[in-house]
Amino acid sequence: MNADFRKIDVHSHVAWMSNGVMREWSVADVVEAADKLGIEKLLCSTPITSGPCTMELIRKCNDVTYKAMKEYPDKILGYAFVNPGYFDEAVKEVERCVNELGMIGVKLYNQYRADEPVLLPLIRKTAEMQIPVLWHAGHPPSPMEALKWGQPRISDGMHIAILAKRVPDAILINGHIGGGGDWEWSIKALRNVPNAYVDTSGSVVDEGMIEMCVRYLGAERVLFGTDLSMEAGVGKILGADLTNEQRELIFWKNIEDILRRGRI
Amino acid sequence: MIIDASAYIGHWPFRKLHYNTAKGLISLMDQNGIDKAIVSSINAVFYKNCQEGNEELAEEIEPYRDRLIPFATLNPKYIAWREDLERCVNDLEMKGLRLYPLYHRYSLLDPESRELLQEAAGRKLPVQIPVMLVDPRQHHWMDVDTQIPLNYILEAADKNPENAFIILNSKTADPILGRCKSGKSPKNIFIEVSRLTAVLNKSIQAVISCLGVEKVVFGTGIPFHYAKPALIKMEILDISEEEKEKIYWKNISKLIDF
């Protein structure tokens, strides 16, 4: 079932929560699960998902990711998590993580929305470096529900499309299209934005979701991910009505192509 | 043999479904190696008079009776549910109930629900409760925006010990596990695996430890969901083949009078 396709998971996490509290499982458990599912590499980050998002905490999070990279060098690749509101310091942290720690991209959470001007210096830098930016993204049913989620500044496909058009050389990934928001909204929003991708991660396994991604964006702009919903992540790509060539693109070829672009 | 305890037929008003006819469902089952499936009518969730949906379902699945096992959707707050139950069981040969207290705006603890549950127990009909049909985080403006808390089903199960409750489409088993830890393991609760996990927090294995493998049943949620995620969970689940057989079909077979 799994052995037929190489798989690179573009949306994963190491086992620490952002506040330093351990999840119920370890990095070793994530790696073991990946092995069971035939996932060759995990692209991981450690974002701060609530509360203060200071540079000190951000560096600690990135060091946690780096520790896991060192522990599993053949399995785990890292994204640098930053808060764009720190402008130069955020850019410097990206440079530290990429140039010194060997990370391959940037992870952004919901501290700012993708269409806010504060993002531009950071995103221009990632475009210059040709490294991908993975967004924690989702479209809530209403602004009130975004508040209920505690995420008034969560980005959806529309916000990411605006940013992608402003910085056409940037490589932007709309994270977890199956993460619980309105995936049809975000897929439609990203249709005419060639430098924006979606990752398929999240616990939602709605039949037709992956096919719609491919129909609207082309298989070349769809990236396999799990966000730790690991069987769901693999199962939805295997279960979708796709050709094996499309599955290869989604499972690993597209992200490998993106990672080759890095001017690091 | 694989029996899917969680499948549906009918129109979902908030998103286009594919494979949502009997013929479509059978083709999806064939693609995924699923031999039989328990089905109910999605239409019946939205018709005020659920029975019309049950009638449609029975007609739709008639050519596939050897593979599709119909469950009745009933609303204990709506007029003449007893007659509808009679018709569903005696004439349409439905083998269990699928209830939607959130959509039909009643409580499983209401007196009318108790009467329906007593009727179901008397006829040995298992009662399925889907805790959600779609993830509430992506709900349509006119759809329900929450899911049924497991504690609520556990309370109904406590108060109706003669009924077999089958929980469908739950992403968590924590309230059940909590009961077990406090030594009050529910005896009449079964849970379907499609949204649980075989890796990381290993909620399927936890439920097996808590309730026993006999209380776990296989399901997918087709055609709302892809079938493969549930199948992969079973494939990588670190239990014996004999135990897998129980989950795949033996446990649900015992609950249904084929």
Image: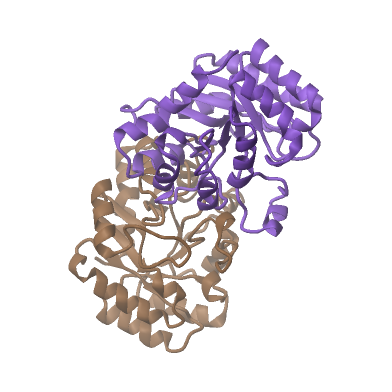
Query: Could you say which is closer to the camera, residue B178 or residue A133?
Result: A133
Vertical order, B230 against A74 (above or below): below
Vertical order, B5 against A200 (above or below): below
Determine the image quadrant of residue A173.
top right
Determine the image quadrant of residue A7.
top left
Please state if A57 lies on the left or on the right of A29 as rendered. right
How are the residues colored?
A: by chain
Query: Could you say which is closer to the camera, residue B150 or residue A192?
Result: A192
Residue B159 x, y percent position in the rendering: 55, 71
Determine the image quadrant of residue B252.
bottom left
Identify which residue is drawn at 42% across, 44% down.
Answer: A210
The chain letter corresponding to brown is: B
Identify which residue is drawn at 39% across, 30% down.
Answer: A249
Query: Could you say which is closer to the camera, residue B247 or residue A87?
Result: A87
Please state if B142 lies on the left or on the right of B250 as rendered. right
The chain letter corresponding to purple is: A
